[in-house]
Image (spheres, rainbow, N blue to C red):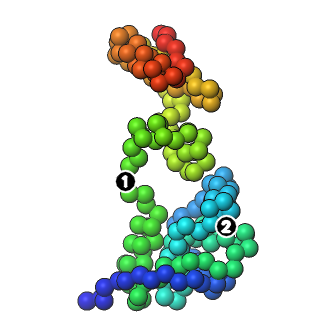
Amino acid sequence: MAKKLEWHEKTVAVKDLRPFERNPRTITKQDYNKLLASLKKLGQFTPLTATPDLRIIGGHQRIKAMQELGWQDVRVSIPSRDLTDAEFHEILIRSNVANGQWNMDILAADFEVQDLLDWGVNVDWALPDNDAKEGGDGDSLELLETSNYKITCEFGSEREAFIFLDEMKQRKISAKAGK
């Protein structure tokens, strides 16, 4: 039976880290630019993960950005022993999976949609639905905010639409109703 995994953090020279050649993660140019901006503004708030011989497990995109920014040293979380292939692959995937869900009420109330977009949060819930533009069977309500976002909501009855409209007005959100 393998010894229990324990992790420690240390500072490592960027040049000493080796990427995993079969890393399944990619990044778009737009997301890479967001990553660069984040590193410039906030620094490295999460360590990379690597094997004891410094093969990167998690942080391939960050290390590319750090190299581009001229960083010499980075923080890396390293296991206390060599990993089995199965452990390596599991950590490779788990380190890139977002567990949990967002509380949409808190996001909508406490954060600006543009900030969430800039930070890489999927805000499809706050953006217009292409199907809604086609028109639906029920009544619909369009919300127009000063940030130029348009949201179309569909309701089963006119009464439901106007209750929602009233709630938006109470929150000082510009909204209009129509069929």
- Measure the C-alpha gap from mark 2 to mark 1: 27 Å
Q: Residue at x 72, y 69 (%)?
A: 69
28 with respect to 124 (left or right): right
Percent x, y of residue 122: 51, 45
Label 2 CA crowd tier, 10 Å (few <14, some 14–19, many 20+): some
Q: What element carries label 2?
A: helix
Q: Mark 1 points at which residue?
A: 100
Dots 2, 1 in contact, CB < 8 A: no
Is residue 152 shown above or below 112? above
Q: Residue at x 41, y 20 (%)?
A: 167
Residue 65: mark in rendering: 2
- Image position, residue 138 (x, y; %): 39, 15
Mark found first going from the N terminus, 2 or 1 = 2
Q: At which x and y percent is residue 88?
A: 42, 78
Residue type at the position of mark 2: Ala
For the residue carrying disc 1, how many other residues have a C-alpha within 10 Å: few (<14), some (14-19), or many (20+)? few
